[in-house]
Amino acid sequence: MDTFAALNTSGLVPHGYRVEERRLFAVERERSVGRRLPRKLITNGTLQWQDSPWTWLRLNPQMGEQAVKVLVCGDVAGELKALFQRVKSIQKKTGNFDLLLCVGEFFADTPEAEEEWQLYESGVKKAPIPTYILGAVSPETAGKFPSPHGCELADNITYLGRCGVFTSASGLRINYVSGREAARDSDHCFTTKDLTDVLAPVGANFRGVDILLTSQWPKGVWRFANKPEVDTKSCGSGAIANMAEKLKPRYHFAALEGVHYERLPYRNHIVLQENAQHVTRFIALAKVNNPGKKKYLYAFNIVPMKTMESSELVKQPQDVTESPYRGLAKDQEGAGTGEEPRTQFFFDLGSTDGGGRKRPQRGDGSGPKRPRNLEPLPPGVECWFCLASTEVEKHLVVSIGTHSYLALAKGGLNAGHLLILPIGHYRSTVELASEALQEMDKYKAALASFYRSRGERCVIFERNYKSQHLQLQVVPLPLDCCASDDIKEAFVQQAQERKMELAEIPPHSDLKQIVSPGAPYFYVELDTGEKLFYRIQRNFPLQFGREVLASEALLNVPTRTDWKECKQSRADEEKACARLRKAFQPFDFAWDD
């Protein structure tokens, strides 16, 4: 039995067919394009039917191993002339591409755009490359699409359809969703029910898809990565985010926001818990011919997933991050429960900043911040580190943000030993809301710059074991005292001596993806970005982090392993905190806020 594929000079298959005894049988129909049936069968390996642009060619077994050259474009918005001139220029320099995929709004409701389109619809002009477009995103252009199932609109310009899946002759699998998310169905919107067919292939053995095309961005795609130039409060679709998490595309393209944004690649597996999978790259493209000259065309080569060796497919780039979607729904629910209000007011750190200069006024400018209505602690809990608690030692506070704060460590390993703590009552990093986690990361970066200016590098560790409140311990070490490799070796070696195995986890990883809330663990982060993790079983030494840093190989202060033996008087603590507050002020983002 021979396998044939329908080609329209692009390699895209509108239907899958097999040929047996010169009869053509449909075995699969993934989208409604090219509905005309063949009238003539040619026996030399090519099938052709009259009055149809579709040609059926015998598939080469090695075809799937070849890379497909793809162009992707943002909102065309009727700028066909500018788009196709640019495509011709690119092809002249780099050779022909196999297809052009257009996301966002393709048409525009203007006389000029309509006049230009008529030239292509009538056949006077022809697209220089097989072009595949998404449907309408506004009621003004919905009339341009005669069928929700897709159709050929002009020579070399094909409307994919409202949502669905198609596969190229080389095996490239592309999923697509047109329009904006809405509660009710319309000709330019989609609902969550419309995504059922797109998600149908997802099952136990599902590996993912090669390309996902959507008009809208996925909600929260920027989490754990570089931030886009968009309003993140209103941008994106939750349904698209949920779909992207399940489909695991290697490339995801979107538009509509008028900006170019390439997110750092993210992984589709949980580190140390699941087998490695491929990464996803999300790319948003700007409008064609935009005045700001933002990027609207993206070119790349891609070998279909189904033909790749697993070892090649799952290779992880150095800048990979955790998935932005895992846990997103939970964070969004928490944002509406009042767990961490955006508007928070704290006690003033003092009338001066420790150097005789008045601390800037807050709020409406009428004076320093007044105490806010802090959320009450859980019943029966008295915590030394919650700002709502009467037990907190506020004279140790160095800086206060919106969701977290910085404090001098009581009985610290050295004068620069600090703590980063959440304002609310959280036991560990994995329980934090995303906003609190992001702000604590800002404190990490600020402290790294602060210590570097003093000729020091910092080590951060957390022990989620027999502790009430999350404490990120931040300890500086002089650069000439030891190298980062020495610090790593000291932690690994001393752990092995206690028959513990510290696992190294990839950069940009998120503890929430490695350990469940409530599970005990120990975590170390070096200034190189390297991270060590141990899942605590039992009898973990409470002072392990301090013991390693205080050892002869590092700080060489073995008498300071127990904080209780290093306590200062309150007066000395106040002086030490004032000095640190003054020194840290140029690096304190909370001061600027």
Image (cartoon, rainbow, N blue to C red):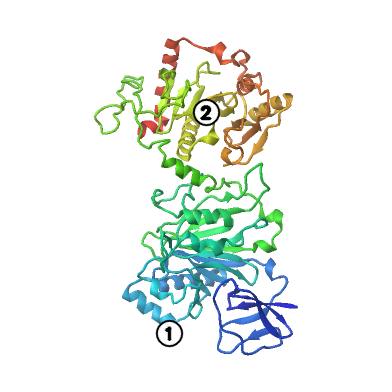
Q: Residue at x 41, y 65 (%)?
A: 137
Residue farthest front in this picture: 379
Q: Name the spot of residue 477 as percent of width and height, x first.
A: 56, 24
Classed neighbour count for the residue bearing mark 2: other residues with Cα under 10 Å, few (<14), some (14–19), many (≥20): many
The residue tagged 1 is 122
- Please provide percent x and percent y for residue 97: 56, 71
Residue that badge 2 annotates: 470
Up-down: is 190 above or below 232?
A: below
Looking at the image, tell me whether mark 2 or mark 1 is earlier in sequence order.
Answer: 1
Query: Which of the pair 63/468 is nearer the observer?
Result: 468
Q: Nearer the viewer, residue 171 or 514?
A: 514
Do the numbered discs 2 and 1 sit on residues whose CB atoms are within 8 Å?
no
**Dot 1 surroundings within 10 Å: few (below 14), some, or many (20 or more)?**
few
Q: Is residue 491 visible?
A: yes
127 up-or-down from 460: above or below: below
Q: Secondary structure at mark 1?
A: loop
Mark 2 → mark 1, Cα distance in angstroms: 67 Å
Expressed as whole percent of the image width and height from the top left, the position of residue 283 reads 50, 57
Image quarter (top left, top right, bottom left or bottom right) of the N terminus: bottom right
Which residue is more in the foreground, 135 or 302? 135
On the picture, is 438 further left or further right than 173?
A: left
Q: Amino acid at mark 1?
A: Ser
76 w.r.t. 205: above or below = below
Q: Secondary structure at mark 2?
A: loop
Q: Is residue 82 left or right of residue 484?
A: left
Q: Amino acid at mark 2?
A: Leu
Nearer the observer, disc 2 or disc 1? 2
Q: Can you say whether 460 is above or below 283 in the image?
A: above
Instruction: Quadrant for residue 503, please give it.
Output: top right
Residue 472 image point, x, y percent:
53, 28
State left or right for residue 59 relative to residue 329: right
Q: Residue at x 48, y 23 (%)?
A: 381
